[in-house]
Amino acid sequence: MRSACRRGGVRAGLAAFAFAVSTVLGAVGGANAANDDAPTIRFGVPTWPGVTVKSEVAAQLLEHMGYGTHQMNASPSVILNSLKTDDLDIYLGGWMPTEKEMIDPLVEAGEVETLTTNISDALLGVAVPTYVWEAGVRTEADLDKYAEKFDRKLYGIEAGSGTNKTLQDAIDADRHGLGDWELVQSSTSAMLAQVGRKIRKDEWIAFSGWRPHWMNITYDIKQLEAVGDSRIAAQKSDVLTVANVDFVERHPDLATFFSQYQIENEEQSRWILEYSYKEREAPDVAAEWIEENMDRVATFLDGVKARDGRPAIEAVREAVAAM
């Protein structure tokens, strides 16, 4: 296995190696190119750890295939508008149904195209430690039955987030007796630190939980089941790959790659664990995963050609072996 320092320097040389150019170009402002005429594929990346690593894995594969890449960090609304105006090519974080009102009109207008669901069965809701679930808290309707054990508190994330709003709405509506409960707002990291403290003491806590995320690997937790028309429990979601329509026409091979680039929940949860929880660099996490999961990479690249015309998987294997 490569050392971390070797992996950390990989981005500047991936595409350059693929075309055996004599001068390796460094990544500047998040961009990397094989040579002056190599197309640069432009990613829109919100500052979410899962999409960050997912985009990095895809970018490194493209660089192995001879393309340049550029990643722009922005909010989903800015990214989607930039796809519409042909200022970005690809977005791997189209969270549905949360972004449905932004994505659907662009698809209907023929300005963007959805290529695949890259994460299926994502979930957002209220979670509890498994020992709380085993004690009888299985649904959102069970929370108030044990209000004293929870100190009548629901732990949320950042103030102003959509997640917190749905929790507060449930409290304001006195849903299932939650009207006298308090929403504790802080941040994702602070909330999860509190979860860890409570679990170490076998104390009760109900909090905003979702997958994919490292919390599902690090903590033994369960998602509460929804009751009726719930908006706070077991909200199933999919994550779409959204592309600029001209990009799809210009690069049919890459459209095929992105259509086949589908990630398991467990894979993305582990990426988030390495990047967000263990605080490793995204390029290191991505490079290591590619090297150790070439069978998965082969499924993404089935039928795809590198820029030099050979099967993309051959170019990737050769580049990885040389690192």
Image (cartoon, grey):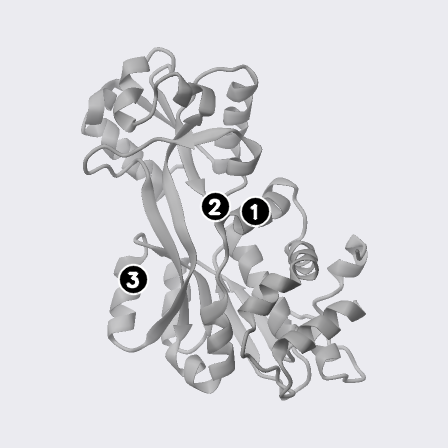
Residue 92 located left or right of residue 323: left
Q: Amino acid at mark 3?
A: Met
Front-most of 62 and 80? 62
Picture coordinates of residue 273, whole percent (x, y): 59, 43
Q: Residue at x 40, y 34 (%)?
A: 208
Above or below residue 224? Residue 33 is: below
Type of the residue with mark 1: Ile
- Total marks in image: 3
Q: Is residue 243 left or right of residue 66?
A: left
Question: Which residue is label 2 attached to?
Answer: 212
Q: Residue at coordinates 44% horizontally, 80% vertically from top-left?
A: 247
- Quadrant containing the N terminus is bottom right
- Residue 272: assigned label: 1
Element class at badge 3: helix
Disc 3: CA contacts within 10 A as few (<14), some (14-19) or many (>=20): some
> What residue is pinned by disc 3?
102
Looking at the picture, does residue 113 appear above or below residue 147? below
Tell me the SS state at disc 1.
Answer: helix
The answer to whether any part of residue 26 appears in the image is no
Instruction: Specify the quadrant of the image occupied by residue 173.
Output: top left
Contact? badges 2 and 1 (CB < 8 Å) = yes
Q: Residue 154 vs residue 247: left or right? A: left
Q: Are the residues at dot 1 and dot 3 in contact (C-beta closer than 8 Å)?
A: no
Rendering coords of residue 12 (x, y %): 72, 70
Q: Nearer the viewer, residue 40 or 140?
A: 140
Q: Estimate the x, y position of residue 90 in percent, counting from the top left.
A: 46, 70
State the residue in front, 214 or 266.
266
Crowding at mark 2 (Cα within 10 Å: few <14, some 14-19, many 20+): many
